[in-house]
Image (tube, rainbow, N blue to C red):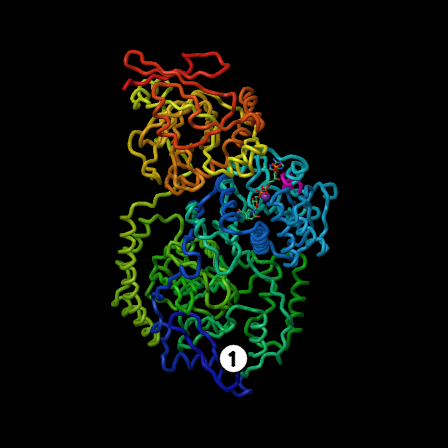
Amino acid sequence: MLPLFGKTKAMILTYSSSFITHLLALPPASTSTSTRAVTSSLLHRSLQGSFGPILRYKLRSYCSAPVNRGEFMASNIKVVQNPDSISYLNQREAAEIDEILMGPLGFSVDQLMELAGLSVATAIAEVYNVKDYNRVLAICGPGNNGGDGLVVARHLYHFGYKPSVCYPKRTAKPLYTGLVTQLESLGIPFLSVDDLPMNLSEDFNILVDAMFGFSFYGTPRPPFDDLIERLVNLQSYNEINKKPSVIASIDIPSGWHVEQGDTSGDGIKPDMLVSLTAPKQCAKNFSGSHHFLGGRFVPPSIVDKFKLELPSYPGSSMCVRIGKAPQVDISSMRENYISPEFKEDEVDPDPFIQKWFDDAMAAGLKEPNAMALCTAGKDGKPYTNYGSRKAKDLSENCYASLLFYWDGLNRQVRIEGCVAKVSEEESQHYFHSRPTGSQIGAIASKQSTVIPGRDFLHQQYKDLEAKFSDGASIPKPNYWGGYRLKPEFFEFWQGQTSRLHDRYDIANSLVTLRGMNQDIWWMNENHESNHYCNNSYDDEFYDNGCDYGDPYESYENDWQWTDNSAQNQYQGSSSFSENQVRSDEYSFDDKLDQILDMIEESPNFSEIQESSEECNNNMWKQMMEMQEDNSKRILIMQRKLEELMEQLTQPPPETRSDTMHENEVSFLSSDELYDTKMHKLTPPELEVVVEDYVSLNDKKTEKRLENEDVEIGLERNQINLNEPITPKVGEGLVEVNTTSSPTTLSKPDAQPFIVTDFKRLVMYKKVKDFIIRPFLESINVQVSSHKSVAHVIFENQKLKVILFSATNDPPIVGDLFVINTIDDYVYEHTANMLSDTTRKLENCLPCNRSRMLNKFGSPRVMKKTQKKKQDFTFIRRSKVKWRGCKKHRARKYWRNDYGWRLKKTIWYFYGSHKAGRLELYKVEEGIPFDPGGSQITFDSP
Ligand SMILES: NC(=O)C1=CN([C@@H]2O[C@H](COP(=O)(O)OP(=O)(O)OC[C@H]3O[C@@H](n4cnc5c(N)ncnc54)[C@H](OP(=O)(O)O)[C@@H]3O)[C@@H](O)[C@H]2O)[C@@H](O)CC1
Ligand SMILES: [K+]
């Protein structure tokens, strides 16, 4: 850029594919020419020159060339921004992703933690500016979530914040000691819980909640219970104090149930949540203002595997907002510009405000050479940027264009339409809603009049300030008032690479945006001498007295502009879809209707011709151009319509629902089941005594199990069972789905199991679904052919049971089964998923289950599961005792060489024929035989 920026060459280019005009270089201009004159004449030349005065209409392209946006982002990550369609992970999935990332995908924990922490820090900095939210306390827990907190503190320090850290349960691992050392070397204070004020708001603006992440379970133990309590009570403290400090939670609001959220309602209420990798289910309960996603390291393989629907990260951003930004009152948005003193000698007209341009370059502003072309005045010249002339132009030509250029988002919206003054009443209302300083400023500054100097202006201001110091109402000067623009044309623009930008035009009055279907207005224009063009083109508008709804309706917040990319290549801009510029309220049908209406109602040539008589010649040309544009727009709309129609006829994508639907639940009583379902079962071919066993096909594992102490304990990634759950031990029954299984078994000869009797199931109740933990030793597993799906009816809830046998996954040759909820089933029913689940299940068998059983607190189970290594034994398959009618077939189906089981707990099944029915009883060593309680009857073969 800069080498071109010499004093010899000059040219202003308007890009056909971009609305933005770029100053590439400048002409040799006489130093005596004023800056304004140079710019003005340049613009004039470019417009009136070879392209003619209506260049912007002629050269506009309506469809940017298609860009393969996949190039710029992980191809599998779909662009999602509707929070309802975003994926939420359960605890198991979160742990699994963690495992995969750090296992087969080769990441290290410190690497992920650094990226996670950085994304949290950037999200915090995006929302809470360093000026108002300087003092930060990171409260760090014992696990990786705490580690994230340490990383966040370091990054925030470098962003200019003043962090402190409370890290009461330190971990001795090098990763953590390293993070602590890094913070200490920056002089970041480490505070003990006792050092902290009861009211954390007294000392801190931001409280980073890094206590617990997705591995949290149960209720918080000390000292975190106390810390969480302080976060909970923060709000009430602050009602009497100053501005409350804000809570920014990392990944999970600490203390919340990872899946069910704030079940008691007494948990912390963070203002911000930065979900990592993908939001966890509890995030659905998050009601704070700022939900972000961070952890930009999810590779496509994980996106595919877990069918993740996540919002795309804009540009090179480390975080992306989920859902809408909070509504703000735009009428109260005003920036207090703090700028250095204006020095005339710093604005050099030759070549072009060089100093200022250099300043802009040095400040790293994006495309400092971009400028917006506004509408033309009567003479076709673009507006200059000072007030009364604008007002004067508007009095001659009501057409104006508003440009919202959102830097950092690669987006702009241009709105064209006719302008009229708002009512005096509205102007009065708005004037008095402004801060006193602005009201006085409006009187002190006679816009566009020459004043002796800045001192004069200051004096004026001071005098007025003194005059109104008694709090008296400041009268609105009569030259001060608002304009309202009635939109006729919108152009949504989104920058893409190689200047192949996306553009979406909406013509006429059929504007589909909430907020934008109203007039847009602005204030603070001097329209003392104004009279607007009473254009017959839209009589109604004027007749109605310009009453088009609440002028302060925030339109900005109706979009989620998430882009934040760097450089003018606009790498990684999310692809533009018109859905984004559509209000949530509008259904697809509405949209279709609108498009149809739009096509019908587009202004026809004769109307424009008529109305144009009142306009000057230039205006007429523009109208002609507009007409041309309209026909192009219609074409585009028609094409769009076809596409939309096609979409409409597509079946909705199969999505994974999180709730169980009523019609998926069968309400059969146990009795009914016995009668109507069970007896219809294909009679069992054999009964297998199944112990807690894992299949072993490698000597190494076998050795480990034989020679080492078998670790009995809950692995980190197992679903936590420490919660105080009253186990519900009762009867479970099985409804067998007799249709062929949707499961693709990876081995052609695989014979799935069917669970036909759950004598004892432990129910583990969740909010919406049930997780069934089968006690294998109490389940009668039957081998049956080609039936791999069963519905378990338990307490009126029908659950799918996925049963499957050998997969070709190398470490597993076992016969395992998984029980999931219906939804999980739908989600996981591909062979791929099954093989993974198998692995998962294998990992947790049997040690973790022992622990699980333990946790349920059933005394008998407890006794049974508090086993040491010596309680377990390996048994050869051939040595497994079989009882039942068709023992020999057991070997055929049991392909494993080994099983392992508790030495003493052996189950026997007895079966007998009675009157054409097969009756099975289950008995247990040491437990009185109760045929009534455990009998199942089948039709005899
Ligand atoms: N790929 C990813 O997704 C990435 C994830 N990352 C981050 O890792 C987080 C998950 O980390 P994590 O697994 O270490 O678990 P986390 O929740 O921090 O703490 C577990 C600790 O808390 C303890 N504890 C549990 N319950 C308790 C209670 N009631 N009261 C008291 N203590 C309790 C538990 O103790 P234990 O039960 O073992 O004795 C253990 O010490 C995740 O949320 C994200 O922030 C990023 O760093 C990188 C990428
Ligand atoms: K947390």
Left or right: residue 163 versus residue 658 is right
What percent of the width, then of the height, locates residue 542?
Answer: 38, 61
Quadrant of res 270: top right
Please state which amino acid type lies under the numbered disc 1: Arg
What percent of the width, then of the height, locates residue 487?
Answer: 39, 61
Q: On the rendering, which quadrant does ligand 2 occupy?
A: top right
Give 924 or 621, whichever is nearer the viewer.
924
Q: Residue at x 55, y 57 (%)?
A: 333
Question: What element does badge 1 sit on?
Answer: helix
Image: 682 above or below 378: above
Extent of the magenta region: 231-237
Give 648 or 260, whichever is nearer the viewer.
260
Give 162 or 626, whichever is nearer the viewer.
162
Category of crowding for the residue at label 1, using alpha-carbon neighbours closer than 10 angstroms: few (below 14), some (14–19), many (at least 20): some
Residue 127 visible to the viewer: no
Residue 648 visible to the viewer: yes
Q: Does the stretch in magenta take in 232? A: yes
Give 383 or 548, whichever is nearer the viewer.
383
Q: Which residue is mark 1?
A: 36
Image: 9 above or below 333: below
Left or right: residue 263 versus residue 811 is right
